[in-house]
Image (cartoon, rainbow, N blue to C red):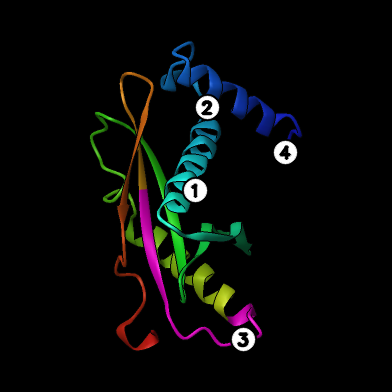
């Protein structure tokens, strides 16, 4: 990965806010990175504490791992333009859900301390036509089997 990518993404984000950069001109990775930053900002405003960013287990990755009081929250971030045909919520395919379940279980196994309460959330970051963003937070999305938490 190019070490300048985070700086480049930040520059694009600043240009987008000021109206000088269009969401459509960004690369997919830049869109995703900016969406994750917006989601993180949104969750912090709601009182969440960020534990890990982009945690990987093999080829699988979870965007954010947070704490909502005593609950460990796994967060997948989906960034979309406002008029996208498929919403971020509906873009999580069964294959992606299986990958998310694997990475979440991997994180839980890697912890020394048993985590009693955990859940999976999805944050959809919508890039509006005026260059601003809106975050839709879906809490406790069905991912884990009922017996697991």
Q: In this view, does 35 lie to the left or right of 127?
A: right
Residue at the spot of label 1: 40
Q: Is mark 4 on a helix, strand or loop?
A: loop
Q: In this view, does 13 lie to the left or right of 94?
A: right
Q: Which residue is drawn at 68% across and 29% down?
A: 7
Residue at the spot of label 2: 27
Q: Residue 87, how many percent across, how many down?
A: 26, 42
Earlier-in-chain disc, 4 versus 1: 4
Q: What element carries label 3?
A: loop
Earlier-in-chain disc, 2 versus 4: 4
Residue span colored magenta: 109-123
| Label 3 packing within 10 angstroms: few (<14), some (14-19), many (20+) | few
| Label 1 packing within 10 angstroms: few (<14), some (14-19), many (20+) | many
Q: Residue 138, how many percent across, how many down?
A: 29, 56
User: How far, Cα to Cα, is label 2 from label 4?
Assistant: 14 Å
Residue at the spot of label 4: 1
Q: Do the residues labelled 2 and 4 touch (CB within 8 Å)?
A: no
Residue at the spot of label 3: 113
């Amino acid at each position: 990965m190019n070490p300048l990518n985070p700086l480049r993404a930040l520059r694009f984000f600043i240009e987008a806010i000021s109206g000088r950069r269009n969401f459509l001109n960004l690369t997919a990775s830049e869109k995703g990175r900016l969406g994750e930053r917006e989601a993180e900002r949104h969750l912090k405003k709601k009182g969440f504490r960020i534990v890990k960013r982009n945690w990987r287990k093999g080829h699988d990755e979870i965007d954010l791992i947070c704490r909502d009081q005593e609950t460990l929250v796994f967060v997948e971030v989906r960034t979309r333009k406002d008029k996208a045909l498929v919403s971020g919520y509906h873009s999580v395919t069964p294959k992606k859900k299986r990958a998310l379940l694997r990475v979440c279980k991997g994180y839980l196994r890697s912890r020394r301390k048993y985590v009693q309460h955990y859940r999976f959330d999805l944050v959809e970051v919508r890039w509006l036509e005026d260059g601003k963003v809106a975050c839709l937070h879906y809490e406790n999305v069905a991912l884990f089997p009922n017996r697991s938490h």
